[in-house]
Image: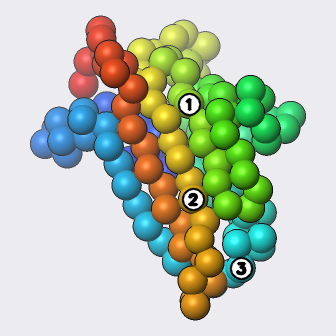
Amino acid sequence: MCNSMVAYPLRLRNRAVALRMRAMHIEKHVVLAAAPAEAWAVVVDFASWFCHAADMSAIKPGARIQFSWEDGTTRAAVFEDVDVPRFLAFRWLPFARDEHGDPIPRPQARVEITLTAVDEGSEMHVVERRLDGALAGASA
């Protein structure tokens, strides 16, 4: 299952939503019925909740991850901070590739995922912030 609202904010059909998302501060909270150590395994299994497939050799600062979606689009990111099982941050590279491998400009952004223990299990807090100047040359 793909979360295209997060993965492709500039390709949204609803232009009003796309224009609001240009500011690129997206924040979501969800409570998972699992302790942080168990929830961590789900969070880092990106193909179970975010994309069609995720190719990565390691989850550590400096490691690269390649996300793929069912339409053939791919996008890479680099892990910046990791504190198992509490915190994960990665930076999107400033382009994706379409099904033919051609580059598509995308905003460069940092995604932070935090897991906090709560009575119900774990609260997952996801924040995506555009990095300054990231949309130069990109179009809706």
Report x, y in % for residue 47: 69, 51
Query: Disc 1 vs disc 2: Cβ atoms closer than 8 Å?
Result: no
List the residue tagged with mark 3. Answer: 35
- Mark 2: which secondary structure? strand
In the rendered image, the residue lying farthest to the left is 16
Q: For the point 43% across and 67% down, which residue is it? A: 29
C-alpha separation, residue under disc 2 versus residue under disc 3: 13 Å
* Residue toward you, 62 or 3: 62
In the rendered image, the residue lying farthest to the bottom is 119
List the residue tagged with mark 1. Answer: 91
Q: For the point 60% across and 42% down, which residue is it? A: 89
Number of residues whose C-alpha sits closer than 10 Å to that of mark 3, classed few (under 14), some (14–19) or many (20 or more): some
Of the numbered discs 2 and 3, the one sitting upstream in the chain is 3
Q: For the point 63% across and 84% down, which residue is it? A: 121
C-alpha separation, residue under disc 1 versus residue under disc 3: 26 Å
Residue flagged by tag 2: what amino acid is it?
Thr
In the rendered image, the residue lying farthest to the right is 57
* The C terminus sits in image quarter: top left
- Residue 17 visible somewhere in the drawing: yes
| Image: 68 above or below 29 | above
In the picture provided, is 2 more to the left or to the right than 131? right
Number of residues whose C-alpha sits closer than 10 Å to that of mark 1, classed few (under 14), some (14–19) or many (20 or more): many
- In terms of image quadrants, where is residue 114? bottom right
Number of residues whose C-alpha sits closer than 10 Å to that of mark 2, classed few (under 14), some (14–19) or many (20 or more): many
| Image: 76 above or below 18 | above
| Image: 83 above or below 40 | above
